[in-house]
Image (cartoon, grey):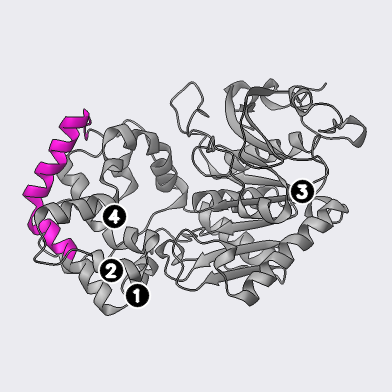
């Protein structure tokens, strides 16, 4: 068999070369795929499915064979070779739990989960993050599809939520015909990182004035009682053996968490949770407990923060980040620029922002994206800048009152019917060989 970049086995597919899963035991079929390792089969609670944890040898740099390889972690929920296959992107680690995504449920399809390069165990031996780019990850997904189409030659649908939804979009930008359709949930589109006021405007208008004022009051109280809250934070870190070397200090980490309160509240909660927002007379213990739950205080300490260095690196080199309302906190902030990605990436890791990456993605979506569903929540600040496809067979659908954790099931009945119809139409076209991958 011919060799591909980085000395890896080629994964081009010919009809006569396909190994059909199900003709023999699927384990044998998986082991026959070049570069793929069957790590283990785990019990599956999904009736009619077998669940596998896999490792695929990938190039560190798809354009340079000499850059070496790494093993990318994958998961597989297998039901039958003649069913559609859903490519599931997380943008982070891949869950080692057998759980079908909404498109896999609706299509009764197989599902392949892809761990994003440089996350989880999918890390090259060298700590250099230079090859953690949009296009390199898209090329990872491309090789996964081409390899597994030997087992699953029919329809392919890609999906993901949040950063996984972004990864699904980026994959289509560089390999538009790999799949027959894409469902991207809650996928941000920060087109111009120099202009982040869309997020500020969103947070200044989402919900009701009463809820927004309650959140601002809670933020001010937290910073007015900074010393007590930081002491509690430091005591927690000491008790758990954690530190704040990456961010710099518990004091800076707390300020970042407080700044992010409105964003995190609307991303994960709804207006019905407003009654739990602590008021000006709340105890310091109550303020700390609510902040810990709302803004996830442990994520800023080193034991968790080091796992997300690749995430912040991506934000600081291509994806861009956001701005947050802060006028109501005048005189209480001590760390200018604290919420920038640089705060979460060690200084010995260089970062240079590529201002062309996201405009390129945005132009492609506006002009070329087809067979796409973008599913967003109307109260999710992450999609203050949504993707806006222009072609007929690509839609942005909104879940009324939805936050960052929306599904198609939350759409209005008319929009839900439209979404399901489109998804099944794309899958049917793919099974007939008439979909995007055959175009």
Q: Is residue 273 magenta?
A: no
Pointer 2 and pointer 1: residues touching (CB < 8 Å)?
yes
> Does dot 4 land on a helix, a strand or a loop?
helix
Pointer 3 and pointer 1: residues touching (CB < 8 Å)?
no
Q: Residue at x 42, y 69 (%)?
A: 379
Given residues 385 and 129, the one toward you in this image is 385
Q: CA distance from mark 4 to mark 3?
A: 38 Å
List the residue tagged with mark 2. 274
List the residue tagged with mark 3. 84
The circle on residue 294 is 4
> Does dot 3 land on a helix, a strand or a loop?
loop
Q: Say whether disc 2 or disc 4 marks the residue closer to the N-terminus.
A: 2
The circle on residue 207 is 1
Q: Residue at x 27, y 59 (%)?
A: 261
Given residues 19 and 318, the one toward you in this image is 19
Residue 235 relative to residue 172: left or right: left
Q: CA distance from mark 3 to mark 2?
A: 42 Å
Q: Residue at x 21, y 70 (%)?
A: 214
Q: Residue at x 29, y 48 (%)?
A: 296
Q: Which residues are magenta?
A: 218-244
Q: CA distance from mark 2 to mark 1?
A: 10 Å
Residue 240 relative to residue 321: left or right: left
Q: Tag 3: Cα neighbours inside 10 Å, few (<14), some, or many (≥20)?
A: many
Q: Main secondary structure of the magenta part?
A: helix
């Amino acid at each position: 068999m011919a060799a591909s970049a980085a000395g890896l086995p080629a994964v081009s597919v010919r009809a006569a070369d396909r190994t059909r899963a199900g003709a023999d035991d699927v384990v044998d079929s998986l082991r026959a795929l070049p570069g793929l390792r069957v790590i283990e089969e785990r019990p599956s609670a999904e009736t009619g499915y077998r669940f596998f944890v896999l490792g695929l040898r990938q190039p560190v740099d798809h354009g340079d064979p000499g850059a070496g390889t790494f093993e990318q972690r994958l998961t597989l929920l297998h039901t039958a070779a003649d069913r559609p296959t859903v490519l599931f992107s997380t943008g982070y680690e891949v869950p080692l739990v057998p759980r079908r995504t909404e498109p896999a449920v609706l299509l009764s399809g197989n599902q392949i989960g892809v761990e994003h390069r440089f996350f989880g165990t999918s890390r090259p031996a060298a700590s250099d993050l230079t090859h953690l780019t949009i296009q390199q990850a898209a090329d990872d997904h491309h090789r996964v599809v081409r390899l597994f189409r030997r087992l699953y030659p029919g329809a392919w649908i890609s999906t993901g939520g949040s950063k996984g939804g972004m990864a699904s979009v980026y994959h289509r930008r560089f390999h538009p015909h790999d799949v027959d359709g894409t469902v991207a949930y809650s996928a941000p589109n920060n087109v111009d990182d120099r202009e982040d006021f869309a997020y500020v405007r969103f947070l200044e208008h989402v919900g009701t004035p009463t809820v927004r004022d309650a959140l601002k009051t809670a933020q001010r109280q937290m910073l007015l009682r900074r010393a007590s809250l930081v002491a509690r934070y430091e005591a927690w870190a000491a008790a758990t053996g954690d530190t704040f070397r990456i961010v710099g200090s518990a004091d800076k980490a707390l300020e970042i968490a407080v700044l992010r309160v409105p964003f995190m509240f609307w991303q994960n909660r709804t207006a019905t949770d407003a009654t739990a927002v602590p008021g000006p007379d709340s105890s310091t213990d109550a303020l700390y407990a609510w902040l810990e739950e709302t803004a996830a205080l442990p994520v800023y300490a080193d034991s968790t923060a080091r796992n997300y260095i690749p995430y912040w690196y991506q934000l600081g080199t291509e994806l861009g980040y956001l701005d947050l309302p802060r006028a109501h906190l005048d005189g209480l902030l001590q760390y200018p620029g604290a919420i920038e990605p640089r705060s979460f990436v060690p200084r010995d890791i260089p970062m240079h922002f590529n201002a062309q990456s996201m405009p390129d993605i945005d132009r492609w979506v506006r002009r070329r994206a087809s067979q796409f569903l973008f599913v967003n929540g109307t109260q999710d600040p992450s999609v203050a800048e949504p993707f806006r496809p222009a072609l007929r067979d690509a839609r942005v659908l909104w879940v009324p009152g939805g936050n960052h954790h929306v599904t198609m099931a939350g759409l209005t009945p008319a929009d839900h019917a439209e979404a399901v119809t489109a998804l099944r139409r794309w899958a049917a076209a793919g099974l007939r060989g008439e979909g995007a991958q055959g175009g």
